[in-house]
């Protein structure tokens, strides 16, 4: 029986360290020993100091349920919670602001009796203004500006089910709409040219639709001006994951470049993890779809990239003094990007299958280095027994125990929504991506 003291990294559910960490122990007499790697038994607790052990195969007391705090009741009634935290999510509230602004304008025009007598140019300007807002809010420069400002002061199921088709329609239909607007502006201005006796340049200069479309077009073209093909060095981690290394640039904290093997078809963003020597970065790719599966099984030697890397939600994390970071699977990648800032006070929960075999001992070591008491949950044995970790409970316990100021979660949409709802409805400040790609 081994008894773990403080500064322990909890690795639950049959973690095999045969390929894993080089840990140092102290025996009962205080003499330092370095045992050969051995197959560890179930429910282990590893410590980087003060182990009492009679053998090199360590077993610790079970930790399930120990120190668990009862979750408080959810705030407000069921209807209010569902409306506030589920239906009216942040993403939908932002949409609602735009919709209400349009409704207010339409209502004002209807009340004044001008709704059905507007000139064609005004209708086109209004439509172009909505298009401008939709384009700019997705532009990398605007996204980075919004995150910098914060630091200093369609249906989800259909989109995920038919992601590639959605992206193709979204891109090419959008470009077509902009082209049609340009055709409308040019033709309508040309028709006015003869009647007004003014030149086309004069008419366009006074037409707000022209300037709106100009900004939209520049915003669309700008990322493609930085289109380039960059070399890739693939590091095979397992049949489920690969780590891709790039040396063409260095990245700021929690920035996510986009990559593609076919620029006109689909693009995927991954959080860049700065290399330890300060030159280049890497990204973690796990088998989570057809494109990522292809990358894992046949790692490329080159990939396309465009635009500038956009900051992710974790970019705002350093404004908090104490954090709880929750990740599942390759969601540890963005967290590793954040952990590059060494002066953070964080607690980490990482739930994944066979963390060492899937993502390598080096990544596990990085997690433990950032949080010596990190909770790393192996889900492989849990799922075979029909039990999944309760991440809401785990995150709440760690939030209370560490007296953190906020919780960040990086996971798939289903787990993210569950954890965000479970904690936000109990008054815990929590931040997560909105999965608008």
Image (cartoon, helix red, strand yellow):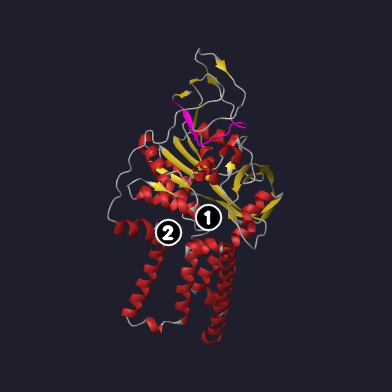
Magenta segment includes 75: no
Which stretch did the figure color magenta? 6-20
**Which residue lies at the image location 47% right of the left edge and 79% below the top edge?**
121
Dot 2 corresponds to which residue? 91
On screen, residue 64 above or below 261: above
Q: Which residue lies furthest to the left in this view?
A: 77
Dot 1 corresponds to which residue? 141
Magenta segment includes 18: yes
Nearest the viewer among 262 and 66 is: 66
Tag 2 secondary structure: helix
Which label's residue is closer to the chain start, 1 or 2?
Answer: 2
**Which residue lies at the image location 67% right of the left edge and 42% below the top edge?**
235
For the residues labelled 1 and 2, the Cα–Cα distance comes to: 20 Å
Q: Contact (CB < 8 A) between labels 1 and 2?
A: no
Nearest the viewer among 238 and 135 is: 238
Crowding around mark 2 (Cα neighbors within 10 Å: few <14, some 14 to 19, many 20+) is few
Nearest the viewer among 117 and 310 is: 310
Q: Is the magenta stretch mostly helix, strand or loop?
A: loop
- What x and y, as percent, mark residue 411? 49, 49
| Residue 377 visible in the snapshot | yes
């Amino acid at each position: 029986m081994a008894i773990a003291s403080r500064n322990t990294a909890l690795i639950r559910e049959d973690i095999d360290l045969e390929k894993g960490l080089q840990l140092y122990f102290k025996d009962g007499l205080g003499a330092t020993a370095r045992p050969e790697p051995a197959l560890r038994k179930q429910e282990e607790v590893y410590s980087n100091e003060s182990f009492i052990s009679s053998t090199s195969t360590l077993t610790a007391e079970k930790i399930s349920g120990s120190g668990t705090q009862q979750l408080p009741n959810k705030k407000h009634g069921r209807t209010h919670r569902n409306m506030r935290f589920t239906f009216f999510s942040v993403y939908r509230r932002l949409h609602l602001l735009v919709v209400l602004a349009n409704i207010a304008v339409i209502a004002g025009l209807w009340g004044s009796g001008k709704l059905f007598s507007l000139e064609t140019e005004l209708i086109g300007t209004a439509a172009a203004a909505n298009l401008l807002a939709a384009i700019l809010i997705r532009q990398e420069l605007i996204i980075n500006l919004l995150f910098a400002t914060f630091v200093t002061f369609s249906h989800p199921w259909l989109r995920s089910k038919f992601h590639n088709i959605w992206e193709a329609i979204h891109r090419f239909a959008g470009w077509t709409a902009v082209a049609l607007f340009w055709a409308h502006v040019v033709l309508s201005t040309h028709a006015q040219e003869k009647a007004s006796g003014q030149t086309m340049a004069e008419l366009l200069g006074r037409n707000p639709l022209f300037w709106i479309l100009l900004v939209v077009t520049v915003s669309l073209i700008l990322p493609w001006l930085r289109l380039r093909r960059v070399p890739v060095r693939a590091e095979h981690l397992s049949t489920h994951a690969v780590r891709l290394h790039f040396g063409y640039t260095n990245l700021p904290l929690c920035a996510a470049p986009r990559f593609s093997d076919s620029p006109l078809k689909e693009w995927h963003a991954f959080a860049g993890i700065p290399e330890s020597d300060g030159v280049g970065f890497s990204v973690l790719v796990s088998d989570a779809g057809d494109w990522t599966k292809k990358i894992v099984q046949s790692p490329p030697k080159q990939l396309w990239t465009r635009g500038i890397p956009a900051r992710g939600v974790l970019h705002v994390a350093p404004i908090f003094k104490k954090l709880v970071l929750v990740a599942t699977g390759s969601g540890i990648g963005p967290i590793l990007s954040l952990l590059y800032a060494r002066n953070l006070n964080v607690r980490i929960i990482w739930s994944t299958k066979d963390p060492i075999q899937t993502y390598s001992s080096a990544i596990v070591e990085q997690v433990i280095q950032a949080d010596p008491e990190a909770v790393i949950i192996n889900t492989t044995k849990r799922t075979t027994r029909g039990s999944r970790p309760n991440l809401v409970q785990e995150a709440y316990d760690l939030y209370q125990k560490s007296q953190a100021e906020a919780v960040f979660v990086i996971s798939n949409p289903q787990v993210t929504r569950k954890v965000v709802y479970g904690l936000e409805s109990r008054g815990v400040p929590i931040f997560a991506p909105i999965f608008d790609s």
